Amino acid sequence: MYSSKPAYVFGFHGLDKDVGKDVLNGKTELRHSKNSYDWLGHGVYFWENSLERARQYAVDDSKRKHSKIKTPFVIGAIIDLGNCFDLLDKQHLDFLAFAYDELARGLIEAGQELPINAPFDSGDFDFKNAS
């Protein structure tokens, strides 16, 4: 058993063209997302081995009313997975199920409902009870 995945992957990130060019030219860095609806946590999201999925994300996001993406663009990166939460690994899936049960129990005890996630194309993000 290992806690560090010995692998590199290609990752692709959809964003605005001007921002992407500034990142590539070292003028800025990717900013971590810190939205209440980031169900995988705060950070910078990449699509593993899927240039087209990152492009689709950027195009879809650009159509949202308040999108910061004016011209869809994709950048790529070689990512050392290191210590990662691999959703293809049964051990990690078991932990995810445990964490979900704990979250649900804690919210019920606090008299709150579980947040409900909406499809990306349902308009601007409209998450019930998200804070």
Image (cartoon, rainbow, N blue to C red):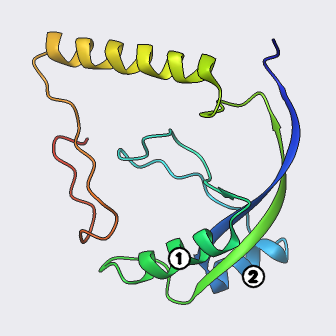
Where residue 120 appears, x then y in whole percent?
34, 64
Where residue 63 appears, x then y in whole percent?
37, 83
On the question of residue 27 being in view, the answer is no
In this figure, which residue is indicated by the disc labeled 2?
21
Give the side of residue 114 with respect to residue 50, left or right.
left
Question: Mark 1 packing: few (<14 Cα in 10 Å), some, or many (20+)?
Answer: some
Q: Where is 33 relative to 105, above or below?
A: below
Give the side of residue 109 with respect to residue 103, left or right.
left
On the question of residue 110 being in view, the answer is yes
Q: Where is 109 relative to 26, above or below?
A: above
Q: Quadrant of residue 55?
A: bottom right
Residue at the (53%, 42%) spot, across then down: 42
Secondary structure type for disc 1: helix
Where residue 79 appears, x then y in whole percent?
83, 50
Q: Work out whether residue 120 or residue 22 is closer to the camera in this orientation and state it.
A: 120
Amino acid on which the number 2 mark rests in the picture: Lys
Give the spatial CA distance, label 2 vs label 1.
18 Å
Q: Residue furthest bottom?
A: 71
In this figure, which residue is indicated by the disc labeled 1?
56
Question: Mark 2 packing: few (<14 Cα in 10 Å), some, or many (20+)?
Answer: some
Q: Residue furthest left?
A: 111
Q: Quadrant of residue 60?
A: bottom left
Q: Quadrant of residue 6?
A: top right
